[in-house]
Image: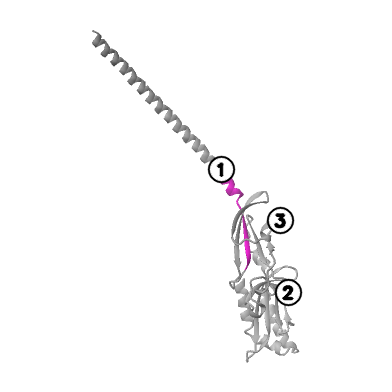
């Protein structure tokens, strides 16, 4: 999805229609060409919005209403050194994957910005289609008014996505103290689930949170219990056979010892009778 977003942004800034729209905002034909180009790309990919912005942030051409406020996740460089693509939160708390590209004139002067965004919630939802797996995403969020730079301390982790609303309760301890690496078994939906926590990096290599994968292991544990039961049964059979073999061996040894003792007594009696005569 990041490749689609970045490739689309690179392709969109190549035609001169966006540059002309920024130079001549009052030209109806020029603005119409820019809107048509953005809508054409938006029809091919599930963009949340595609926007052509002035340096002041005013929308010249937009395919949908832009969020009133976007807040980057903790871990990105300051806004002055913006990553080609990054994850942001809108005012409703939804995750968006955003790509921005400057639009420059022939003298490398900035005329405006192209901004594209995909719903990252949909990306996460499409990545786990198996009923025995669930997914959650925890990330520290910048302080209000922060830009994610090192001068700000992040708040504690925030559960930004959960494939099942019931996960919010059992993952509360992990939200308060986001794990870096963890492997733990948890009860969930009247079954047994294994939680794997991994650091999450975006396409640009920025570490921005933790991905929590939950896999149901109820059947695995039941199969393991059956294997243990069969192993225990076979162990008892083997022990019983071994014990029986030892008993037979001891009986034979005991019989041999008794026979030797009888022969010794008989030999002793013959020897004593020989000398008495």
Q: Nearer the viewer, residue 126 or 104?
A: 104
> Regarding mark 1 in the picture, which secondary structure is present there?
helix
> Regarding mark 2 in the picture, which secondary structure is present there?
loop
Is residue 125 magenta-colored? Answer: no
Decide which of tag 3 and tag 1 comes sooner along the chain.
3
Q: Nearer the viewer, residue 275 or 67?
A: 275
Q: Nearer the viewer, residue 24 or 141?
A: 141
Q: Callout 2: 10 Å neighbours few (<14), some, many (20+)? A: few
User: Could you tell me residue 265's position as x and y percent?
Assistant: 32, 16
Quarter occupied by the N terminus: bottom right
Left or right of 222, for residue 145: right
* Viewer-nearest of discs 3 and 1: 3
> Quick check: marks 3 and 2 in contact, CB under 8 Å?
no
> Regarding mark 3 in the picture, which secondary structure is present there?
helix
Q: CA distance from mark 3 to mark 1?
A: 31 Å
| Residue at mark 3 | 169
Taking the image as drawn, is residue 10 in sight?
yes
Taking the image as drawn, is residue 46 in sight?
no
- Magenta stretch, residue numbers: 208-226
Q: Is residue 270 above or below residue 142?
A: above
User: Could you tell me residue 206's position as x and y percent?
Assistant: 60, 71
| Residue at mark 1 | 226
Q: CA distance from mark 1 to mark 2?
A: 56 Å
| Residue at mark 2 | 145
User: Could you tell me residue 230's position as x and y percent?
Assistant: 53, 40
Query: How many marks on residues?
Result: 3
Q: Callout 1: 10 Å neighbours few (<14), some, many (20+)? A: few
Q: Is residue 172 above or below residue 5?
A: above
Q: CA distance from mark 3 to mark 2?
A: 29 Å
What is the quadrant of residue 213 in the picture? bottom right
Q: Is residue 190 above or below residue 60?
A: above
Decide which of tag 1 and tag 2 comes sooner along the chain.
2
């Amino acid at each position: 999805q990041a490749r689609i977003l970045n490739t689309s942004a690179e392709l969109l800034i190549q035609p001169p229609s966006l540059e002309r729209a920024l130079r001549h905002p009052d030209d109806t034909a020029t603005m119409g060409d820019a809107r048509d180009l953005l809508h054409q790309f938006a029809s091919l990919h599930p963009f949340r919005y595609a926007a052509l912005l002035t340096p002041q942030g005013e929308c010249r051409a937009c395919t949908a209403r832009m969020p009133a406020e976007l807040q980057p996740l903790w871990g990105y460089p300051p806004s002055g050194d913006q990553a080609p693509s990054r994850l942001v939160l809108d005012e409703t708390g939804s995750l968006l994957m955003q790509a921005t590209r400057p639009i420059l004139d022939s003298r490398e002067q900035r005329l405006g910005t192209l901004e594209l965004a995909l719903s990252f919630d949909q990306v996460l939802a499409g990545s786990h289609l198996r009923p025995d797996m669930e997914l959650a995403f925890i990330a520290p969020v910048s302080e209000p008014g922060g830009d994610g730079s090192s001068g700000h301390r992040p708040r504690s982790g925030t559960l930004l996505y959960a494939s099942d609303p019931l996960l919010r309760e059992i993952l509360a301890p992990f939200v308060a103290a986001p794990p870096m690496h963890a492997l733990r078994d948890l009860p969930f939906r009247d079954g047994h689930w294994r939680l794997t926590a991994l650091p999450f990096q975006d396409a640009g290599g920025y570490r921005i949170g933790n991905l929590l994968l939950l896999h149901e292991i109820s059947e695995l544990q039941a199969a393991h219990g059956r294997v243990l039961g069969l192993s225990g049964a076979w162990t008892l059979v083997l022990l019983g056979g071994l014990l029986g073999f030892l008993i037979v061996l001891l009986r034979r040894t005991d019989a041999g010892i008794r026979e030797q003792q009888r022969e010794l007594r008989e030999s002793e009696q013959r020897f004593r009778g020989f000398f008495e005569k």
